[in-house]
Amino acid sequence: MSFPQHVKIYEVGPREGFQIEDALIPTTSKVKLINELNETGLTSIEVTSFVNPKWVPNMADAEALLLAINRELNVDYRTVYLNLKGLERAFAANVKIDGCVSLSASSTFAKRNTNKTADELIQTIPAWVESYKAYNIPVEQLIMMATFGCNFEGEIELAQVMKVLKNGIDSAAEHGETIRSLKLCDTMGWANPEQIKRTVFAIKNEWPELELILHLHDTRGLGIANAYSALQEGVNQFDAAIGGLGGCPFAAVKGAAGNVATEDLAFLCENLGIDTGLNLEKLLNCVNLAETILARPLQGHLKTGGLLLQKNTV
């Protein structure tokens, strides 16, 4: 067991956190939260989605939001887009574009989320490659949705995950692109710590050159335990959401907890002697602001447990 020396946390709260809310969140409130997050040491903030507002009403203000936020030089502002029209909007908005393609280990979820099956998503890779080329952006990352399980199909076998990843990597290579990183998403909160270890080990064994990013949900209370297992396997990049905001509107888990809380993950890392570069007190200020915006308490633990910190340098 060897923990990484440094962990990078990609904040996704302003996008994934607000997308699932029934009530419309004012643009000014979103801007205020993002500007506060700018002050925490985060170097990546996912701020909005370029999607059809008919399906995700809280993302209807994407362009207005991006014009209103304070943009810090040391922060990458990211967005989500599920089709080529969304990519065009993202490029016009001058945000960080990673050259990624989304795949899914579950065809049922893929159909609900993108209106394409898992196989059809792989077949979109050539079109994505050509579209990114128009902006001189290489395709270097695959995002795997429903990596660990699906509320519609149940447990996802590791063999299925490996098959989809191989097909995606091979397809990208056939079109002149080299995949350098994989984002593994526990979209519906099915993962357990041993499954995390098995999956990370298998992928590292098959593709040791690839960087891994984990996007973990705390739907059933195992989010931080899963993050700990990933840290044990050397994973050093994670998505997280301030206060535990988030959830997928197409995942059929209404009312469930969202993503792993940014402040809880940072606290875990700091206790283990792993540097995150984040200011925990300022993160808690952001949690308080998010709770004020939503007028309800969020699921993160650090805000109530307090900042007692004892670093373990083992």
Image (cartoon, grey):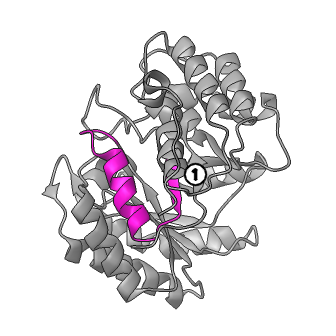
Secondary structure under the numbered disc 1 in the rendered image:
strand
The residue stretch that appears in magenta: 218-240
Q: Residues within 10 Å of mark 1 (few under 14, many from 20)?
A: many
Q: Is residue 64 above or below residue 208?
A: above
The percent coordinates of residue 239 (x first, y second) are: 51, 50
Q: Is residue 14 above or below residue 174?
A: above
Q: What residue lies at 75% left-to-right and 35% top-to-bottom?
A: 39
At label 1, the amino acid type is: Ile
Q: Is residue 218 above or below residue 181?
A: above
Image quarter where the N terminus lies is bottom left
Q: What residue lies at 86% left-to-right and 48% top-to-bottom?
A: 73
As drawn, is 140 to the left or to the right of 189? right
Residue 221 on the magenta segment:
yes
The percent coordinates of residue 242 (x first, y second) are: 53, 34
As drawn, is 148 to the left or to the right of 36? left
Q: What residue lies at 68% left-to-right and 53% top-to-bottom?
A: 88
